[in-house]
Image (cartoon, rainbow, N blue to C red):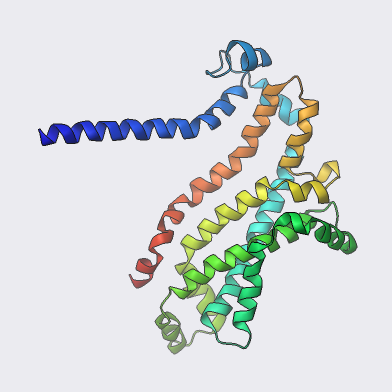
């Protein structure tokens, strides 16, 4: 009897999980369906089901007749550069504040962490004035610098927690073996925080890839727009062609999905870094 109740509860649990997974994934599936339909199917005959005919011409039209490839390249440049700068600067700053002793280290840590509590909307005008005076409006750098600054506070907080969990005996052993500070940092310390790096890569990439408000202020040149800006102006151009617009949204979603797949295993290990170090 107990075995039968366990089987029933296990089956109900599995059905619940499958329903939850379908409910969570359906928006992505629905977007993929719409990218292969025409307007009549999307709004009248078949709004929720799979396409009756696969209209791949929507993708061809989005890539060939509009500026989607340039928007995509701009977003890749800005996002990859932001991730790189934020990870490198965040790691080095956190290591200096968590593993070293120097005058003013606590003040520096608090000052950088305060960036998390400042709403981005309050900084629109100062950032625009600063970027204008630097003469880099309508360039990739005009987005990379603010994105890096905004993500630096959170990344330093995450790295700080991971660095504090690493035993000091690792550095002492490296010092006895004759390793300098940079060799100890890059060869011994950095490999132990791969889960934190993977987690932040996903987080920062999503933030910079999808960011819209600041980009709408700093970028007006058509050739420098990122994908979120390009999708906004598609609304007028594609007012009667929703299929190509959905195709563009599918293309825009691909990098984020790939990034998550590549680093998801490391993210799952993020909670067990202490055990990994001890092992």
Q: Is residue 35 above or below residue 139?
A: above
The quadrant of the rendering that contains the C terminus is: bottom left
The residue depicted at 53 percent of the width and 71 percent of the height is 160
The residue depicted at 72 percent of the width and 56 percent of the height is 120
Residue 32 falls in image quadrant = top right
Measured from the top left, where is residue 232 in percent x and y? 76, 35
The residue depicted at 61 percent of the width and 68 percent of the height is 90
The residue furthest left is 1
Q: Left or right: 145 with respect to 47?
A: right
Q: Left or right: 108 with respect to 49?
A: right
- Whether residue 23 is visible here, answered yes or no, is yes
Question: Looking at the image, which is closer to me, 149 or 264?
Answer: 149
Question: Looking at the image, which is closer to me, 146 or 67?
Answer: 146
Measured from the top left, where is residue 162 in percent x and y? 47, 69
Q: Left or right: 258 with respect to 1?
A: right
Question: Looking at the image, which is closer to me, 92 or 124?
Answer: 124
The residue furthest top is 45
- Whether residue 67 is visible here, answered yes or no, is no
Measured from the top left, where is residue 212 in percent x and y? 72, 46
Residue 272 falls in image quadrant = bottom left
The quadrant of the rendering that contains the N terminus is: top left
Q: Is residue 242 above or below residue 28?
A: above
The residue depicted at 88 percent of the width and 59 percent of the height is 132
Measured from the top left, where is residue 58 in percent x and y? 68, 23
Instruction: Count every numbered label the image shows and give the total.
Output: 0
């Amino acid at each position: 009897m107990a075995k039968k109740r366990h089987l029933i509860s296990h089956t109900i649990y599995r059905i619940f999980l499958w329903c939850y997974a379908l409910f969570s994934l359906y928006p992505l599936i629905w977007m993929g369906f719409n990218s292969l339909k025409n307007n009549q199917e999307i709004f009248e005959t078949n709004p929720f089901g799979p396409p009756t005919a696969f209209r791949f011409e929507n993708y061809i039209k989005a890539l060939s007749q509009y500026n989607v490839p340039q928007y995509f390249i701009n977003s890749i440049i800005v996002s990859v550069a932001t991730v790189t700068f934020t990870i490198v600067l965040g790691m080095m700053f956190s290591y200096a504040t968590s593993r070293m002793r120097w005058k003013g280290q606590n003040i520096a840590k608090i000052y950088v962490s305060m960036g998390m509590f400042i709403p981005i909307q309050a900084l629109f005008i100062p950032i625009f004035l600063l970027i204008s005076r630097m003469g880099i409006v309508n360039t990739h750098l005009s987005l990379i610098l603010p994105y890096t600054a905004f993500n630096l506070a959170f990344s330093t907080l995450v790295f700080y927690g991971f660095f504090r969990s690493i035993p000091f005996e690792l550095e002492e052993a490296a010092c006895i073996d004759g390793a300098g500070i940079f060799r100890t940092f890059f060869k011994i310390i950095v490999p132990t925080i791969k889960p934190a790096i993977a987690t932040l890569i996903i987080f920062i990439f999503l933030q910079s890839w999808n960011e819209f408000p600041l980009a709408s202020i700093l970028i007006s040149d058509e050739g420098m727009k990122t994908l979120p800006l390009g999708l906004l102006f598609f609304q007028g151009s594609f007012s009667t062609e929703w299929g190509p617009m959905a195709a563009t949204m599918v293309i825009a979603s691909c990098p984020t999905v790939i990034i998550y797949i590549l680093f998801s295993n490391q993210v799952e290990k993020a909670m067990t870094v202490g055990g990994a170090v001890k092992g």
